[in-house]
Amino acid sequence: MNWLSNKIVQHLRTVADSPDLSGTKYRLLEKFSAGGMGTIYLAEDTQLHRRVALKVLHAPEASGELSARMWREARVIAKLEHPSIVPVHDVGELPDGRVFYVMKFVQGRRLDQYADAETELPNRLRIFQKICEAVAFAHANSVLHRDLKPENIMVGAFGEVLVMDWGLAKIVAAGRAQSAEGEERTAKSESENSANGRSLLSTPHETQHGTVMGTPAYMAPEQRRGEIDHLDQRTDVYALGAILKFLLGYGKVGLARQEPPNEANEKSASPTLLSAKIPKSLAAICAKAMAEDKAQRYVTALELANDVERFLNGLAVSSYKENPFEIIWRWIKKYQFMILLVLIYLLVRILLFFWFRP
């Protein structure tokens, strides 16, 4: 009896698990990542000769609930045509009945990896603004993300941003989140993150109606309580505030290194939880975005982004009331170069006056 080596056995398992792409225009290249509901493969579009990410349902199922969810997920992403939202190119079924959809293949670093390497705070804030703009676009198209976190955001080599993982996305109608095609009945969870700093799609923690859905460290209080009918765009604003807090306190930016938001500290976003070197106005922006009462948060993601823009431009932010000394100091920092030139001019005039005085 001949024994097969572990390498051959592993190869046979890989071949057996590989989806049958016959009848499609895609050629399988390699398995990329796997989660609770589906597997993502790197594939080639043989007609356009480009690499794509192909997500395939793990196995055919009798109920059709997961298949319906995959179709819905693809349609939600396809609805959001924005430079900072990963596009869907195609969707269909394999010969064995499994649903698949095809996305742009994304190369870059997750936001947490980007933050660990980026040393300039303004650069981080510019990236954060792009994230807010993508989320605001989704909200304008009646879609809530519901699982915003650093691991679901990609940053490219040229500063491009892609918001990933719309598996928990919720269609919003009349200001409230509505269930769709048995989504809340599907007690499945999935987390798909790539190797080597690349992430394609992940869909963690989806549970039954009325229970927690999302990632606890970045979930708004109403989301943690499972109040499905009370979720709106301010729920995503809370998660954006947690991401901003993460960017302000994590990595090498001349700030004290902090851990990402967690269940122990997420209930409060007071400036004391942030580094003492972080400007009070930025801490106040975080506090407003992560307010326990959603009525106290920014109404839209764009409002949050605009306050960050005001901070970057040396202007007062809406979430923080400055005292007179802070106003003067901010004005001095904003116009420090011009003030320096004026002081130099006055000093030269004084020296010339005394030099040429009879």
Image (cartoon, rainbow, N blue to C red):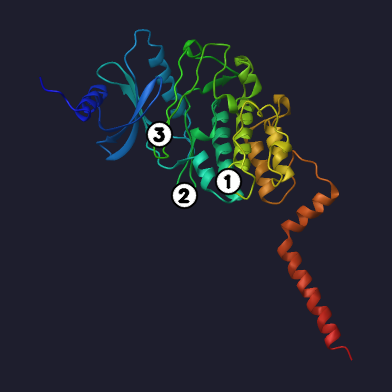
**Residue 340 visible in image:** yes
Q: Residue furthest right?
A: 358
Disc 2 residue type (three-letter): Phe
The image shows residue 331 at horizontal and vertical percentages of 77, 55
Q: Are marks 2 and 3 in contact (CB under 8 Å)?
A: no
Is the residue 281 above or below the residue 21 in the image?
below
Q: Total number of numbered labels?
A: 3
Disc 3 residue type (three-letter): Ser
Give the residue pinned by disc 1: 124
Q: Residue furthest top?
A: 63
Q: Classify residue 358 by image quadrant.
A: bottom right
Q: Classify residue 234 by image quadrant.
A: top right
Element class at badge 1: helix
Residue 158: numbered disc: 2
Q: Dot 1: within a 10 Å radius of its alpha carbon, few (fewer than 14), some, or many (20 or more) residues?
A: some
Please name which of the two marks, 2 or 3, marks the residue nearer to the observer: 3
Whole-angstrom CA distance, mark 1 to mark 2, is 13 Å
Q: Nearer the viewer, residue 178 or 251?
A: 251
Element class at badge 2: loop
Q: Nearer the viewer, residue 262 or 21?
A: 262
Residue 194: numbered disc: 3
Tell me the residue at 70%/33% (across/down): 269
**Viewed as shown, does residue 234 lie left or right of 322?**
left
Q: Are marks 1 and 2 in contact (CB under 8 Å)?
A: no
Whole-angstrom CA distance, mark 1 to mark 3, is 22 Å
Is the residue 351 above or below the residue 178 in the image?
below
